[in-house]
Image (cartoon, coloured by chain):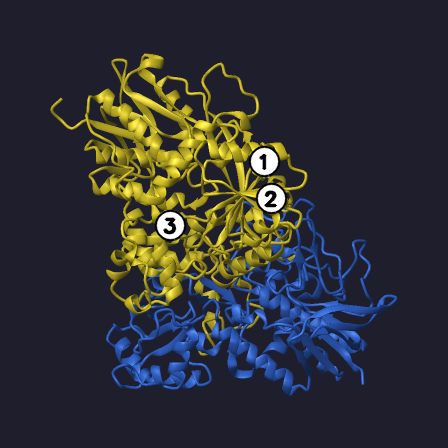
Chain colours: A blue, B yellow
Amino acid sequence: MPIREDVLVVGGGLAAATAALAARETGRSVRLVAHKKSTLRQASGLIDVLGYVDGDGPRADPYGAITDLPDDHPYRIVGEEGVRDGLRLFDDAVGDMYAGGHTDANALVPTYGGTVKPTARYPNSVAPGLASVEEDALFVGFESTTDFSAPVVADHVVAAGVPFEARGVTVPFPIRFRDDARATRFAKALDEDEAADDGRGVRRALAESVGEHLDGEERVGFPAMLGDDHDEEVREELADRLGVSVFEVPTGPPSLLGLKLEDRLFEALDEAGIRLSTGNPAVGYEADGDRIEAVYVDRKGKDVPYHAEQFVLATGGLVGKGIGSDRERVTEPVFDCHVPHPEDRYDWSESAAFGGHAFARFGVVPDEELRPTTASGEPEFANLRAAGGVVGGADVAREKSASGVSLATAAVAGGRAGEEA
Amino acid sequence: MTETPSVLVIGGGSTGCGIVRDLAMRGLDVTLVEKGNLTHGTTGRMHGLLHSGGRYAVSDQPSARECIEENRVLRRIATHCVEMTGGLFVQRPEDDDEYFEQKLQGCRDCGIPAEVLSGDEAREMEPYLAKDVKRAIRVPDGAIDPFRLCVANAADAIDRGARVETHAEVVDVLVEDDEIVGVEVEHGEKAIGIGDGEPGTREKLYADYVVNATGAWAGQIGEMAGVEVAVRPSKGVMTIMNVRQVDTVVNRCRPKGDADIIVPHETTCILGTTDEEVEDPEDYPEEGWEVDLMIDTLSELVPMLSEARTIRSFWGVRPLYEPPGTGTVDPTDITRDFFLLDHADRDGLPGMASIVGGKLTTYRMMAEKISNHVCETLGVEADCRTAEEPLPGSSDFSVLREWMDEFGIRSPVGRRSAQRLGSRTDDVLGRWDGPNPVVCDCEAVTRAEIHDAIDHSGTDLNAVRIRTRSSMGNCQGAFCCHRMANELIHDHDELVVRDSLDELYQERWKGERHALWGEQLSQAMLKHMLHATTMNRDGDPAASDSVIDFAAFDAGEAAPAAAGGATGDDPDRAATDGGTEGENADS
């Protein structure tokens, strides 16, 4: 029996999951085909919406900043309404795992690089660490963690002019692991309250060792490795023992906060009755005139067609390989949608490492319904829409808008796909 | 003369480092000044070929003989800097048979071991060679790490009492009574180098003799002294691949041409090169067609290169020189031999000699000849011992054992460390107290090695990089630049950490720009996302002059309304944008 749905979403990240949820809300049957693990594990787990416009910021009001963006920016296409709809879908999907929805204002979150960064939604464990909270903070790092240096983070946060004092201390983790043990290993030990080297429970041992360094601070921040399945419990126990609030600082890969978000999103897909096919790449399609009939997925060397009425392309940007390139061209590999780019590849980037690189904005050009368009501005296909990193026109890294662009475009693309299926 | 004669060497490349070691071993009072870090100029920008001499066996046999002789010396005194990969001169069907025979005969005439392999035999050694490769000559080419080599020379000189000042740029050559008596240097603004110089100050350094070992920059130093040194800088591109497509040095066997060599180097391969004269050794175009030429031409020898991933490209400038009046037009034809210009004989200005031309493989021999000249001029009688005494790290290879238990690090990591550190392994890893996690995963560099490099080269992370190879692998520092910087916090404040990180990050970016397509563009975007998106390093409020109104931002759900508790319509929420938000809102 052929595989057939009303809406087929191609991709496995934040945009794909949100597009599938948006389409499902319209009552249609929805399937998501994902190839590899999503890039969420590389992301911090924060949901940025918009923090800077052309280098100007941090902006406190992300919605007010939208109108300052260039006309071809995805936010200008979906409008404030689209952005809010994306966040609504996100809030519904993650429930009480995240905070930030009580206000339109951005929060400033200390990152593991020591900078503060504007973001719209943050995991609960991050909330007590916000830079606008006027409580002194002690940052704690572990001796063998090279990514996170507590003294660097604390001094850097202070250098940003935060309204509190901060110090950083480095302590040995109470269990001596191999020197290059990953964050996941620390998290597991805390999750299961394994025995520390001196026989005490590791949570107690950690709290006692950190407690010796507390000097009036009202909160203590750790790199985000405080447990996995039992993270709330770990944090509560540490807070109880220390007598102050405890927070996590989002980290780079492997990002536990990103992984937890990924797990939660896939649970939400399951709860919504969305079908999932994972592990195989989309390699091509079948079309009848300007309508796509099916997407082909390579399953063990065999092309298997997935039929649908409407399709959403959410394969990601350059990192997720939704956008590809060679020495001459930038391409969208599944449907070969048009991706504009400067002819000379030396114009794809700027000489300053953090310049306004053209490559950061590479992606398909959406019309007002988020359908990818040809070079002459016509929709590539009548029933294909794009969401997330594969959509061009936003410099999500400089703007701190990556998650927001994914959510907003997914809400609109998924919603329209559902309505028209 | 009652006092120990003093010599000042300008230039921290292979020649300068070789001279300073040689003279220090002969007991002279030597100072080396370098405007960047060691290997900052040409030495750090070459393909890392340890010549067998085969490349010069037809065109320049004296150079070929010197190469094979020094090739053997370096394998003895610098074991930890050399990887004896072996080399091939590969002939394609369209390449000239007669030249192949000349090459073979030339090698034999110069005492270079040379063996002819059939196409099949060559492909057995290097499976990715093109199917139609006709035959090859096998020679003892190798790979050499110029960074480690210079550092070892400088370290040994310092141990023997020499002074080495990096980030100290010569701003004037001091002439008194028609004689050169020293130089004036300007120490860099920040204390990032090694040496005793006070940052941001000028210092006059007097010496009995000055050696201008600045290569392509020799003309600029000459100008300060009022003498002409007509160096002809010639640029060449090198493109780094992500893996070792070949394990042997692969040369194209034809008279001359661009893009004719692949050198396996550590975890990568380096494609080279071009030869084009430039005006200014520090300001010349670096262009995409040069990178394309490397890939397209060398794909004729190793076809898989056309689809392979490159991680960056860089350019170097050869300090070519020929005596006035020679008039060679094509820089490819200019001799690779070196010249010692004694300005007393040549210009009637005693006190200084300039060294120009030459190549890395024969750096020690050049240093020896120059040191002989210096000693002769100063009336010092001392023999050169640099060909006999191993460089630090090279003396004892029993250290190459299993490091896993010894230092608590996984054995592949330990092996890589031991290869880099040689006999200093015990010293660096064994002395380290505390956890020793891996800082750079691509190149397997541990914290102990980073700290050893910081101890020797200061807060200049680019100097740490060249000592350790940290941030030089596939990810080009995406995952380790900030880790390297974090290690500085033990002895420096946070601003130093931040500045050092920014400098390293920008330096990495310079070369990455030449590899931005396909897999490496994807990698570059990931790096950009980690550093700009996740860490907000591009928008860092701490680095900005404007003051943030923290109260305008969300302070959490429990916070009072003033700190972000209100919803969207608060007109005072514009933060640091100085009102532009309001102005632009209606436009």
Q: Is residue B476 above or below residue B149?
A: below
Which residue in the structure is indicated by mark 3? B461
Asked if both marks, 3 and 1, belong to the same chain, the answer given is yes
Q: Is residue B71 above or below residue B425?
A: above
**The residue marked by circle 3 belongs to what chain?**
B
- The kind of residue on which mark 3 rests is Leu
**Residue B530 seen anywhere in this rendered image of the structure:** yes
- The kind of residue on which mark 2 rests is Arg
Asked if both marks, 3 and 2, belong to the same chain, the answer given is yes
- Kindly state the secondary structure of the residue where label 2 is placed: strand
Place of residue A144 in the rendered image (x, y in percent of width and height, measured from the top left): 34, 68
* Left or right: where A94 falls relative to A198: right
- Distance in Å between CA atoms under marks 2 and 1: 9 Å
**Residue B38 seen anywhere in this rendered image of the structure:** no
As drawn, the residue found furthest toward the top would be: B348
Which residue in the structure is indicated by mark 2? B135
The part of the image, by quadrant, that contains residue B195 is: top left
Q: Nearer the viewer, mark 3 or mark 2?
A: 2
* Contact (Cβ within 8 Å) of mark 2 with mark 1: yes
Which residue in the structure is indicated by mark 1? B100
Place of residue B390 in the rendered image (x, y in percent of width and height, measured from the top left): 28, 44
Between disc 3 and disc 1, whose residue precedes?
1
**The residue marked by circle 1 belongs to what chain?**
B
- Badge 1: residue crowd in 10 Å (few <14, some 14–19, many ≥20): many
**The residue marked by circle 2 belongs to what chain?**
B
- Distance in Å between CA atoms under marks 3 and 1: 45 Å
Asked if both marks, 2 and 1, belong to the same chain, the answer given is yes
| B417 or A332: nearer the viewer | B417
